[in-house]
Image (cartoon, helix red, strand yellow):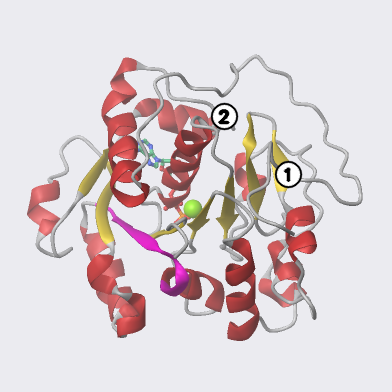
């Protein structure tokens, strides 16, 4: 049997799903593992919100999920490389898009996409949309992933979200009991123990760290966290990877410094997005 390599990150709005997915990917990349980060959200496309406006992103995940005959080459061509790590590439909706730009996305097509995807990289990390009623991609990602991180906030908003959305994952195919529960973006004054029972227990805490908010504002989420105050967050990310993929954290980050110039990426007809490929294609 193939090794587990697909992780879905789901959870309540603003709980830190995207931030966590990116930091998990960076930690894997620091160990020279290829990662495809998939941003499922068609309602607020993520790539234009976390990369500079000059990023070349010409093929949307929307066209992959509605392509009549999807191929591995098409998926790889749609991958957006990032300058901070040759090991990470991204798939997601383009800026200004919505689901109305595409024919209806079917379950069969999403399944086909995820079946192909797992063979294209060492690891696949899927950042799910918090609302998955209107688009099948996130909920099928939760169903098909080897592991699921469920992130909620330590407040009534997070609890209310899960009260509404947990019943949608009640079917045994979602293996809800295996999901790892995380309290994300935990701020000073919030009491995670007080909400733990509502979440059915909590396995990890991702504390609020100011450096993350700064990175979000500066579009530098793909740079490592360097402040000593961010240590507890870094440690939690390492522990999650250790438990889910049995990956130990690397001591030296291989991502470049913030001064590195972004090079415009002209995409040729077919180009590997990675330093090396995983499978045959
Ligand atoms: N641990 C943290 N410490 C500080 N800020 C955080 C932390 N986690 C997330 N944030 C900030 O909170 C905001 C929301 O985070 P993020 O976008 O990752 O959440 P999300 O769950 O993906 O949200 P959405 O539901 O909109 O997709 C961002 O501004 C991010 O920088
Ligand atoms: Mg997000």
Instruction: Count how many numbered circles sit on residues in the image.
Output: 2
Q: Mark 1 vs ligand 2: CB under 8 Å?
A: no
Give the side of residue 209 with respect to residue 257, left or right: left
Residue under numbered circle 2? 220
Which quarter of the rendering shows the C terminus? bottom right
> Who is closer to the viewer here, 77 or 65?
77
Residue drawn 42% across and 51% down? 17
Q: CA distance from mark 2 to mark 1?
A: 20 Å
Q: Which mark is residue 273?
A: 1
Ligand 1 is in which quadrant of the figure?
top left
Give the side of residue 123 with respect to residue 85, left or right: left
Q: Which residues are magenta?
A: 143-153
Answer whether residue 148 is magenta in the image: yes
Question: Taking the image as drawn, is residue 135 in sight?
Answer: no
92 up-or-down from 71: above or below? above
Answer whether residue 127 is magenta in the image: no
Which quarter of the rendering shows the N terminus? bottom left
Question: Taking the image as drawn, is residue 45 in sight?
Answer: yes
């Amino acid at each position: 049997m193939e090794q587990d390599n697909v992780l879905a990150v789901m959870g309540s709005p603003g709980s830190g799903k995207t931030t966590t997915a990116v930091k998990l990917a960076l930690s894997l990349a620091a160990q020279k593992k290829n990662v495809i980060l998939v941003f499922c959200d068609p309602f607020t496309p993520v790539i234009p919100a976390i990369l500079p406006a000059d990023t070349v992103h010409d093929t949307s995940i929307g066209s992959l999920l509605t392509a009549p005959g999807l191929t591995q080459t098409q998926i790889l061509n749609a991958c957006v490389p990032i300058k901070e790590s040759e090991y990470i590439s991204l798939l997601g909706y383009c800026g200004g898009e919505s689901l109305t730009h595409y024919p209806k996305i079917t379950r069969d097509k999403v399944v086909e996409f995820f079946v192909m995807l797992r063979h294209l990289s060492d690891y696949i990390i899927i950042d799910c949309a918090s609302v998955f009623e209107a688009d099948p991609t996130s909920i099928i990602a939760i169903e098909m992933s080897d592991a699921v991180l469920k992130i909620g906030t330590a407040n009534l908003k997070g609890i209310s979200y899960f009260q509404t959305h947990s019943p949608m994952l009640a079917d045994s195919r979602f293996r809800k009991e295996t999901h790892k529960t995380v309290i994300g973006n935990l701020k000073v004054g919030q009491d995670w123990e007080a909400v733990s029972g509502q979440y059915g227990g909590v396995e990890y805490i991702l504390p609020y760290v100011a450096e993350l908010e700064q990175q979000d504002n500066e579009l530098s989420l793909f740079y490592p966290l360097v402040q000593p105050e961010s240590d507890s967050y870094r440690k939690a990310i390492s522990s999650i990877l250790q438990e889910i993929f049995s990956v130990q954290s690397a001591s030296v980050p291989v991502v470049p410094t913030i001064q590195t110039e972004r090079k415009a990426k002209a995409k040729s007809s077919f180009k590997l997005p990675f330093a090396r490929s995983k499978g045959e294609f």
